[in-house]
Every structure is written in structure tokens, then in C-alpha cells.
Image: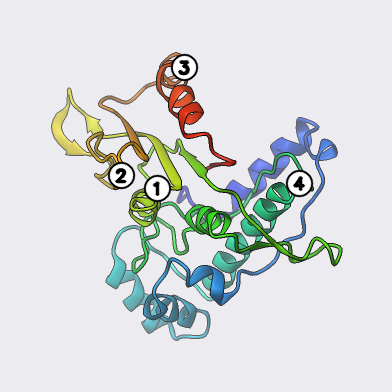
Amino acid sequence: EHPERPERHAAIVAAMKAGGYEDRCVRVPSRLAVADEYLLIHSASYVAAIEKTATATRQYRSRIVRQFENDVYVNSSTWNSALLAMGSALEATASVVAGRHAHAVCVIRPPGHHACSRKAMGFCFLNTVATCAKMATKGELRLDRGTPSERKLFAVEKVLILDFDIHHGNGTQAITYDDPNIMYFSIHRGFESKRRCPTAMFYPGTGLPSEVGAARGSNVNVRWSEPGMGDAEYGEVWRRLLIPVARDFAPGLILIS
């Protein structure tokens, strides 16, 4: 079966229940993202094309799949699911920035870190984490539910996005690259295998260490040249690179993608 399917969400929720984590958490109500949130980073024409998949014919959806090519699949629920994922993450982010909660975890899908301003890629349609970061630094986070005093705008000066998926979050990097108030730190695989095929790039083939951000040092890429990296290798990256640069950057909010 395809790896990006509803059972991924169910498996995470089941694991949280089995580990007793659910009983230690407070559930933050979900909501749909609204236009002034997703249009902050996505073009209106792109959004319109994806939104139309909710009511369009099968032929139109097939055309959208062919248009974006890179592991993009749509059905009548795609648009609503993407809105719910983004809106829920924004609500959770606002609850942390507002001081209501110390931490939050969002079990949401579809994912978002491959989504570009004008393009869907790798099962991603709306770039949730980039939107949360932008809304936070622009002072536009708002709790959708809460007391009257809580329904105000919340902000932080700087945000660190830590992306440690096996794939580079090309969409997140592209959207935040020129923003000195957002640091993007990605740990990802760069090649299929240098032993078997030295020139075969690992999807999406981006995330070079030389890409350091418009504000030099605000974009950090750690690119594994071989598969099979584990706790020891990641621990070294954390100790030698991530923690020092994070302390120097001093973010008011950390988003893990």
C-alpha cells in the first residue's frame, strides 16, 4: 500500500494512547485555516486550482495530478483535509505562544514541507509549518477559541524550524529563505546510495549545505551522503551544530516539522 495513507494518522494516535501520552495531554480543538492565513505564502491562482478539486470532475483531478507530477494525488477531501491540518497547527501554535500550553504536538495530514508557494509536491498541498512561522513573526497568530482577552494577536520575534524528515523540506526552505527572523534547519538524505549510484539524488534533490539563507546562517542543511544514519549520528548533529546555532539565534518559538 502507499505509505501516505490514513492509517499513518491512526497508528500515531494508537501509539500515543498505548504509551499513556493521551491522558497527559489536553486536546486543542481543530479548525479550518482561512484565506488570510494560507494566502500569506501561497498564490491565489495555485490555491484556486487545489480548492477546485473538492467539487471538480475526475478528469480535472487527473489533470492536476499530471500538472504537478511529483507524487501528488487528490480526491474530493484533499482541500478540506489540507485546511484542517493547517488550521489545527495554527491553533496549537497560537496556544503555545499565548502561554496557554508549554508544548503542542499536531497529528495531522496531509503533510506540508514540500509544498511551494505555487506548486504541490510529495503529498503536500499547503505548507503548514512555514505558515505557522510566518504568522508568528508577523504578529498575526490568533486563538480561534478562548476568553475575550485571549482573542488577540500573538507574536514572537524569531522562529526556528527543525525539519528532520528523511527528505529535504524544499518548500519550507524556499518560503523562509529570505526571512532573517526564521531559521530553517534540515537534516535529510542527499543521495540514494553513493556506493550503488554516486550521482542518484534522493527526493526531492535539494538541500545543499551551501544554501545558507539570505541572512547568512539562517538556513542550515545537514545532508547525509549515505542511508542508515541512526541515533549516534543525529546526536552528533544535535550536539555539535543544532544546539550551538539555536542558542546563538535565540528563537522565541521552535517548530519541529
How far separated are the C-alphas under marks 2 and 1? 8 Å
Find numbered disc 4 in the image and state the secondary structure of the residue it sits on.
loop
How far separated are the C-alphas under marks 1 and 4? 24 Å
Q: Which residue is mark 4?
A: 99
Up-down relation of residue 226 to residue 219 (above or below): above
Depth check: give the residue in front, 223 or 91.
91
Q: Residue 142 location in percent, x, y?
A: 69, 63
2 or 1: tag closer to the N-terminus: 1
Q: Is 141 left, or right, of 24 in this rendering? A: left
Find numbered disc 1 in the image and state the secondary structure of the residue it sits on.
loop
Question: Hey, what amino acid is under mark 4?
Answer: Gly
Find numbered disc 3 in the image and state the secondary structure of the residue it sits on.
helix
| Residue 32 lies in quadrant | bottom right
Q: Which residue is mark 3?
A: 239
Question: What's the residue at 73%, 37% (across, down)?
Answer: 16
Q: Is 194 left, or right, of 180 in this rendering? A: left
Q: Which residue is mark 2?
A: 213
Q: Badges 3 and 4: C-beta atoms under 8 Å apart?
A: no
2 or 4: tag closer to the N-terminus: 4
Question: Hey, what amino acid is under mark 2?
Answer: Gly
Question: Hey, what amino acid is under mark 1?
Answer: Pro
Label 4 crowd (10 A; few <14 / some 14-19 / many >=20): few
Q: Which residue is mark 1?
A: 180
Q: Badges 2 and 1: C-beta atoms under 8 Å apart?
A: yes
Up-down relation of residue 71 to residue 97 (above or below): below
Q: Nearer the viewer, mark 1 or mark 4?
A: 1
Q: Badges 2 and 4: C-beta atoms under 8 Å apart?
A: no
Question: Hey, what amino acid is under mark 3?
Answer: Arg
3 or 2: tag closer to the N-terminus: 2
How far separated are the C-alphas under marks 2 and 4? 30 Å
1 or 4: tag closer to the N-terminus: 4
1 or 3: tag closer to the N-terminus: 1
